[in-house]
Image (cartoon, rainbow, N blue to C red):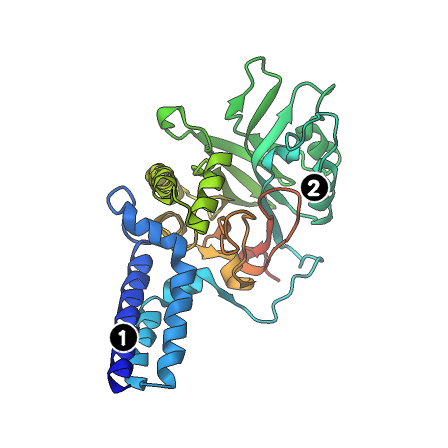
Amino acid sequence: MATLRKFTKRVFIISNIIVVVLFLLACANAFLHPVRWWIISLLGLVFPLLLLFVFLFFIFWLFSKKRWALLSLFAMIIGWKNIHTFLAFNIGSSFKEEKQANALRVLTWNVRRWDEFSGLKKETSFHRAKMLEFVEQQNADLLCFQEFFESHNPKEYAENILYIQQQLHFPYYHFSQDYRRYDGMYETGVVIFSKYPIVSTQKIKYDIRDNMRGTESLIAADINMNGDTIRVFTTHLQSVLFRSKDFRDLETIKNVDDSVLQASKSIVKKLRHAYSLRSGQADLVRGQLDKSPYPSIICGDFNDVPNSYTYFHIRGNKQDAFIKKGFGIGRTYVNLSPTLRIDYILADPEFSVLQCKRFNLPYSDHHPVVADLQLPSKAQ
């Protein structure tokens, strides 16, 4: 019995050490370029699970051998920055529909082409009307949409830009027009809508290798907000581009089928390629943010989790609105995992973050995020 206890204790200690090492490597991936360290980047996807195991080991050793609890405790202290970007701790935070005076309300949302192509029949209304109704109810000043769909064939699909300008009262916009159907009838891309005048715009197109899609340009709009100029960016970074087969492969891995090795190779190959493309895009975004002569905000679908190189590199010294004023994990992508927060509103330190909320809606495969910001010059 004593031998068995000794063996079990040794297994727990070794397991704890392995988990702590993997956890710290997952934390380090935020600072390691994925082109060189793509294997460590993959650990970022299981960061929540590793954090859970580290915490459980900590609790276990507290009631057994307290000195071993220090191992998990030190790991969590070292990884605190990563933990805090994964979890927002603003307990009791609430979102007020009424804006404060001189607040700038920003809404970002990957609208998945307004759900126009989710069914079999084009005449089906899907969720577009409900989505636009939600947008109207938010009383936002700036809208940043990814996978925005615009039709030049109103007989089949409504013109979204005209509707948002006239019905939602956003007269100013900047649209990237990244992808166009061969006959010019439809376009998709990222877009910024503003109730305040847009005085200048930029569009930076990413280098798309191997004719891969799943990414949209970085665009910027300089906005005159009652005499103050701010620069607003939005973008949609490289997606992994999972197809039906890839989701089936994930089920194969989960169920440990005979073909698990082949399925894993396929998934890892796509993840590695996407990490490589996104890291280069993150470098480009960082360069553009550093060039801004005005206080800036960047919103968008980064397609990467909070403890990733992409997130930390783009964020820099910016404030993550959800971490500042939200609570919990803040999942924004509805597939694959309940821990995927990949849509962000990041603001320069010059802004005060007044409130932020992630709305849980069933219309797109992403949830919208809304934040109220304020420049010090506008504070009362």
Q: Position of residue 368 (x, y in %)?
A: 60, 48
Q: Quadrant of residue 65?
A: bottom left
Q: Could you say where residue 76 lies in the image, as x and y percent from the top left?
A: 35, 71
Is residue 33 in view? no
- In front of the other: label 2 or label 1? 1
Q: CA distance from mark 2 to mark 1?
A: 51 Å
Residue 359 shows in this picture: yes
The crowding category of the residue bearing disc 1, from other C-alpha atoms within 10 Å (few below 14, some 14 to 19, many at least 20), is some
Where in the figure is residue 362, as x and y percent of width and height?
A: 66, 47
- Mark 2 sits on what residue? 131
Could you tell me the amino acid type at mark 2? Met
Left or right side of 113 for 314? left
Circle nearer the N terminus (2, 1): 1
Give the secondary structure at mark 1.
helix
Q: Nearer the viewer, residue 60 or 156?
A: 60
Residue furthest front as drawn: 1
Q: Give the quadrant of the N terminus.
A: bottom left
Query: In the shown orientation, is residue 342 left or right of residue 365?
Result: left
Q: Amino acid at mark 1?
A: Ile
Q: Residue at x 24, y 44 (%)?
A: 36
Q: Is residue 65 above or below residue 121?
A: below
Q: Can you identify the residue that label 1 sits on?
A: 13
Q: 10 Å neighbourhood of mark 2: few (<14), some, or many (≥20)?
A: some
Residue in the foreground of this view, choosing between 354 and 78: 78
Nearest to the observer: residue 131 or residue 286: 131
